[in-house]
Image (cartoon, rainbow, N blue to C red):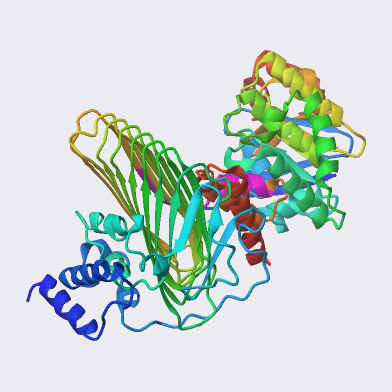
Amino acid sequence: MSLQKAKQEATAAQLTAVSVPDGAGWLTSLREDALKRVHTMGLPSRRDEYWKYTRPDTLAAADVTPAALFENDETPMFDEIDRLKVVFVDGVFDADASDDLAGENLTIERLVDVAKADIHWAKDLYGALELAGQTPVERPLAAYNTAMATDGVVIRVTGAVSRPVNLIHKHLDTTSDAILHHVVKVEEGASFTLLENGPAAARFNSVLEVDIADKAAFNHVRTQGRDHERRVATHLFTRLGEESAFKSFTLTANGVLTRNECVIELTGDNAIAHVAGACVGEGDFHHDDTVFITHDAVDCESRQVFKKVLRNGATGVFQGKILVKPDAQKTDGYQISQSLLLDEDSQFLAKPELEIYADDVACSHGSTTGAIDEEGLFYLRARGVPKDIATDLMTLAFLAEAVEEIEDEALADEILARLESWLERRRG
Amino acid sequence: MLEIKGLEVKLEDEDKQILKGVDLKVEAGKVHAIMGPNGSGKSTLSYVLSGRDGYEVTGGSATLEGEDLLELEAEERAAAGLFLAFQYPVEIPGVGNMTFLRTAVNAQRKARGEEELSAADFLKVIREKAKSLKIDADMLKRPVNVGFSGGEKKRNEILQMAMLEPKMCILDETDSGLDVDAMKLVSEGVNALRDEGRGFLVITHYQRLLDHIKPDVVHIMANGRIVKTGGPELALEVEKNGYADILAEIA
């Protein structure tokens, strides 16, 4: 039996009693289509090339592996920033904890509410970028999300939005299984910042579709909570119009399993897409950044910067691809993935790929893995800085190169300050 | 202040003896210079004293005000008052010069049971000291030594020395890579720190640094030992005749 057939049969068996959530108007047929796609693709298996370095079992299984809650008394992330809070608790919208869903130059609505409207802009977008992102590489967990997501918001941005929207993902139930699907449409010339923070659930499947029109800008800063045992699979799909800009940064500390996929399609000339991430993990920690950027227009720039600090048996994965289509001349593509291994038990697996069909492009990629610089460490110690503090200083400096990809200085400073305090706390 | 007795050191990874019994005593308030041909063990001596990995002490002792240096970690030696101005200051990308210095100053103060310096107080002190070394605000903000010229790196070393106020300063070929003006600036920085309570050990190939930083005692090191000790005139003799005469004399 072929691998594909075996996968389909296993998926059919697992999903035999599964049907899409009902009573959701136009969403129902989109969900049913997505579920059919899942059956055709099959849920991911260990033998899939795209899952070579990360085991998908616990992300795809019918049952959730419980995850303990992370108790802490820290100030919530982004608390200093004036923002519109949208709170989800274990994947369910919490109206009481959220702000009014209204803001200047934007509409924000719950997915379940807009599904009841006969005519709605989100109808043409829900699942559309996810579907486009299934080629050339299949992403069954994203299709599963489109089929099964029970909550989420749809946001339409019509002008410059000064107050960011903050999706806050709380995890209060040790066995929660959250599936959220958000859609963002940034209209021509509009600009918008989306913040996300929190672990969300014991297991979290998230899809974010972002359609960025000509001359529009979208900024995204995300932190994924610090619950050690939580598992998460995220997909961010985006399509960029002419002279538009997309910037996304993700900070991950802790979490037994994280797979963050980012699928970017540059479809308008002179567009810019930057995606970056910093992660710090130790012990039972597996963190995978998978990025696929397609250049399908002239004079576009893409940039990937990923940094991972690993110790005590942690594993980091980076799969990053830049695909330059035949007409995407003057493409400027850059990709760097680096790991800092603080001991010999940890590992970093990197698979950088370039596939270029245009002849007038500048693409570069690099990947490094290494220990802390001994010369630098000695220099700091010779000035009286104890070894553990010196190590943290250098660790923070290493991560800062990814954090600095965040355009907004206040946000970048907050992320750096958090990292610093976490390192300090770990030092005891 | 610094007392070294019969210090024998080999490389950790190789069976190669570098120091073969070094005896040296630097008193508080004095400047001692060590000169010597390449490969004589001068830099090794500075590294071993400051606690760098890769060396194995096979004999002898080194104490700072009676405290056994060789038993201490590098950072503990620094807190005890030892300072090495590096021949090749290390670049540390991403770590701001100012952050680095404040961390170092406060770590040392903490280790000595003193109160940490507030950000405002630190800023006041460093601005003043940086000014006399012609180190501008931009250099203080930049990552440690990254993109610094040779002269800037050495000035930065002296700034660190001035901020940390060590009891015993070792300068390892601080003149290398410096033009005449920079050497003058660096020397002025060092001279400003000369003090009755502070000892200096200046390692150099050339007499010219010693024109600016006038030594009380000059040692000649060769083949892992101090082979001759004298006054400032010894440095002039080396400058004039090279090491050959001295080495022949003691052979």
Quadrant in which the N terminus of chain A is drawn: bottom left
Image quadrant assignment for residue B250 = top right
Is residue A207 magenta-colored? no
Q: Is residue B194 visible?
A: yes
* Residue at x 14% of width, y 79% of height: A9
* Residue at x 65% of width, y 23% of height: B151
Residue B117 % position (x, y) = 84, 48
Q: Which stretch appears magenta?
A: A366-381
* Residue at x 86% of width, y 33% of height: B30
Image quadrant assignment for residue A247 = top left
From what the image shows, is residue B91 above or below residue A19?
Answer: above
Residue B82 % position (x, y) = 77, 45
Work out which residue is located at the far bottom of the displayed protein and give it: A17
Is residue A376 magenta-colored? yes
Viewer-proximal residue, A183 or A312? A183
From what the image shows, is residue A56 above or below residue A154?
Answer: below
Viewer-proximal residue, A104 or B190? A104
Residue B15 % position (x, y) = 50, 50
Q: Is residue B94 left or right of residue A45?
A: right
Q: How many marks?
A: 0
Q: Is residue B55 visible?
A: no
Work out which residue is located at the far left of the displayed protein and give it: A1
Q: Is residue B195 left or right of residue B161?
A: right
* Residue at x 63% of width, y 33% of height: B87
Viewer-proximal residue, B246 or B239? B239
Quadrant in which the C terminus of chain A is drawn: bottom right
Work out which residue is located at the far right of the displayed protein and give it: B196
Viewer-proximal residue, A62 or A46? A62
From what the image shows, is residue A128 above or below residue A228?
Answer: above
Residue B1 % position (x, y) = 85, 44
